[in-house]
């Protein structure tokens, strides 16, 4: 599989399927993941967040190259994945049953 | 002793005569008959917010809205640079829905020079005038000037587009929005163009979800786990008191403190919040939006701990203005007495860099976590209100004043409408 992230973030390639452009898709990924998978992603990505932000902030948001855009989406995915790991200890929001709350409009990047 | 000064009467609720302090009936949230009255007396007669001007960037830009609660579909279009118009979404020939794509019952948007009916090709310009009739000479005594689209009153306040489906309405929008509308004018809503919009179908009466969002009494309990343990215990010991409440005609507002932003003690926040410098209250270091002096409706008690004002413009438009330079709107669109569509839309300034984009993302997904908890709790409430228990009235405390006001206002609209209808019937 070709790499999707900038070379210096090659260690995060195993989690590149979080690098998808919509919150809706990232949330679907979260609730179809096991806690082990979510914890693995969090443990790999969280310690590198400062480096990722420094890398991204050196570039213009409106014209990010694809690999940088993927990195940004992966970290958007970390925001979504942080709740099961830091708060709930389960992928879904407790007591949220069948409730859904779906993004119908999101920023392009 | 209250933490924050209450009115001289001793409570917010007693400050507004007519609200009473007794238990409140929730019979208005479980009755198909009352819902039909609300459709006629409220949703077919009041100003309803249906969108923002940014959704109609150029002449010919349009969107449709399905307003089930008023039993209609409308088209909203930018007819000229400075004019937004609205029409019932119905062709004058034989009643076909004029503007739709693929699925007739779904909303759509786009840009066009004129509207063309898919059925027989009748055309209408952006002012609603009929400009073309297929085989016009086949019709009898026919003048297409008589077949303009049925227009709907549309007005814009601070970039928010409202419609009123009552053709006899004589109250201008600004007058309807009253003191809160006037007091918010000048807020730079037009700077907040980074939009995240969410939608949910909720199995509860529309007023129950408004209830949930007009009191924060539930927050330290229902959402306890979303704070770090120590902060959560503290919040639940203290409970919740708003900084201020206010009521103006059918509208209401609550002014509240939030967590300190940016926080002086970051250990009260989760690791991800510390890294992204953001959370429920929004990005800790938001971009400047040129706010300057705050409009007078915001932070009416002038407290330093102020973080958020939440306005309910009756019946179903809630506008939340946060200290951290962002805005959240809620819309509750009833689809039956025990279902509605909830829309939550987040407006930020365009992020200047990835750090700000990520801070906004965390605020948005945090809002989503809360909304999922709130939404599901509502279905639990609706099902029990509908159950055959002997319980029909429920006590509301002083922090629940806006709920009392909402249900009282809805009833007043129903009563006024019924009185006017029976008076009209007597004269007939």
Image (spheres, coloured by chain):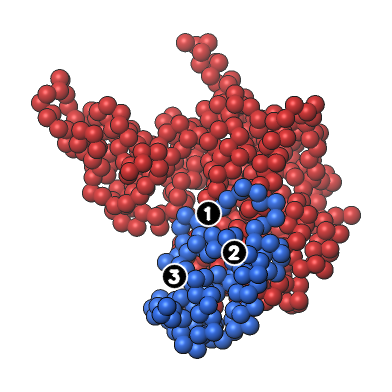
Task: Say which residue label 2 marks.
Answer: A33
Question: Can residue B83 be seen at all in this image of the molecule?
Answer: no
Q: In blue, which chain?
A: A
Letter of the chain that mark 3 sits on in the rendering: A
Q: Secondary structure at mark 3?
A: loop
Mark drawn on residue A109: 3
Q: Estimate the x, y position of residue B69 in percent, counting from the top left.
A: 50, 34
Mark drawn on residue B355: none
Label 2 Cα crowd, 10 Å radius (few <14 / some 14-19 / many 20+): some
Report how far apart the C-alphas of labels 2 and 1 lie in the structure. Answer: 18 Å
Label 1 Cα crowd, 10 Å radius (few <14 / some 14-19 / many 20+): some
Q: Earlier in the sequence, mark 2 or mark 1?
A: 2
Q: Estimate the x, y position of residue B86 in percent, counting from the top left.
A: 36, 41
> Where B105 falls versus B358 (above or below)?
above
Q: Nearer the viewer, residue B158 or B240?
A: B240
| Left or right placement of residue B24 versus residue B55 in this view | right
Q: Are marks 2 and 1 in contact (CB under 8 Å)?
A: no
Letter of the chain that mark 1 sits on in the rendering: A
Letter of the chain that mark 2 sits on in the rendering: A
Instruction: Give the colour chain B carries in the figure.
Output: red
Task: Say which residue label 1 marks.
Answer: A102
Task: Give the residue at x 75% y 53%.
Answer: B222
Task: Give the residue at x 49% y 45%.
Answer: B49
Q: Nearer the viewer, residue B265 or B407?
A: B265
Residue placed furthest toward the right: B1
Looking at the rendered image, the disc whose residue lies closer to the viewer, 2 or 1, is: 2
> Where B188 falls versus B132 (above or below)?
below
Q: Give residue A2's quadrant in the image.
A: bottom left
Please state the total of marks drawn on the protein image: 3
Report how far apart the C-alphas of labels 3 and 2 lie in the structure. Answer: 24 Å
Q: Earlier in the sequence, mark 3 or mark 2?
A: 2
Report how far apart the C-alphas of labels 1 and 3 lie in the structure. Answer: 18 Å
């Amino acid at each position: 599989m070709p790499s999707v992230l900038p070379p210096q973030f090659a260690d995060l390639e195993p989690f590149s399927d979080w690098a998808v452009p919509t919150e809706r898709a990232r949330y679907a990924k979260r609730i179809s993941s096991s806690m082990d998978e979510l914890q693995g992603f969090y443990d790999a990505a969280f310690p590198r967040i400062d480096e990722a932000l420094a890398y991204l902030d050196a570039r213009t948001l409106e014209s990010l190259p694809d690999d940088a855009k993927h990195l940004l989406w992966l970290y958007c995915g970390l925001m979504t994945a942080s709740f099961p790991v830091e708060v709930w200890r389960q992928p879904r929001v407790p007591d949220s049953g069948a409730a859904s709350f779906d993004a119908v409009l999101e920023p392009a990047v | 002793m209250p933490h924050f000064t209450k009115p001289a009467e001793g409570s917010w609720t007693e400050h507004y005569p007519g609200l009473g302090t007794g238990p409140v009936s929730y019979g208005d949230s479980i009755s198909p008959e009352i819902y039909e009255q609300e459709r006629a007396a409220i949703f077919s007669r009041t100003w309803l917010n249906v969108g923002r001007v940014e959704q109609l960037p150029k002449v010919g830009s349009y969107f449709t809205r399905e307003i089930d609660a008023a039993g209609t579909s409308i088209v909203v279009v930018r007819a000229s640079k400075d004019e937004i118009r609205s029409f019932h979404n119905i062709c004058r020939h034989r009643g076909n829905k004029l503007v739709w794509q693929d699925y007739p019952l779904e909303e759509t948007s786009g840009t066009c020079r004129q509207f063309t009916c898919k059925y027989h090709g009748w055309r209408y310009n952006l002012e609603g005038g009929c400009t073309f009739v297929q085989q016009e000479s086949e019709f009898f005594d026919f003048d297409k000037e008589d077949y303009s689209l049925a227009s709907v009153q549309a007005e814009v306040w601070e970039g928010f587009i409202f419609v009123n489906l009552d053709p006899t309405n004589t109250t201008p929008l600004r007058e309807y929005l009253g003191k809160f509308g006037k007091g918010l004018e000048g807020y730079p809503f037009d700077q907040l163009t980074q939009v995240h919009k969410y939608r949910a179908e909720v199995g509860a009466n529309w007023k129950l979800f408004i209830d949930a969002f007009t009191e924060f009494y539930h927050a330290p309990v229902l959402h306890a786990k979303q704070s770090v343990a120590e902060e959560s215990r503290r919040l639940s010991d203290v409970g919740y008191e708003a900084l201020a409440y206010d009521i103006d005609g059918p509208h209401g507002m609550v002014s509240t403190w939030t967590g300190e932003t940016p926080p002086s003690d970051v250990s009260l926040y989760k690791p991800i919040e510390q890294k992204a410098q953001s959370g429920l209250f929004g990005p800790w270091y938001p971009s400047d939006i040129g706010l300057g002096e705050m409009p007078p409706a915001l932070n009416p008690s002038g407290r330093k701990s102020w973080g958020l004002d939440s306005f309910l413009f009756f019946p179903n438009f809630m506008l939340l203005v946060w200290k951290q330079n962002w805005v959240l709107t809620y819309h509750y669109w009833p689809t039956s007495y025990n279902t509605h569509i909830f829309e939550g839309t987040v407006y930020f300034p365009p992020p200047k860099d990835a750090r700000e984009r990520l801070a906004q993302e965390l605020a948005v997904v945090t809002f989503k976590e809360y909304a999922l908890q709130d939404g599901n709790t509502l279905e639990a409430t609706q099902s029990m209100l509908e159950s055959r228990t002997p319980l029909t009235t429920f006590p509301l405390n002083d922090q629940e004043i806006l709920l009392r006001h909402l249900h009282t206002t809805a009833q007043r609209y129903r009563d006024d409408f019924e009185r006017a209808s029976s008076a009209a019937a007597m004269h007939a």
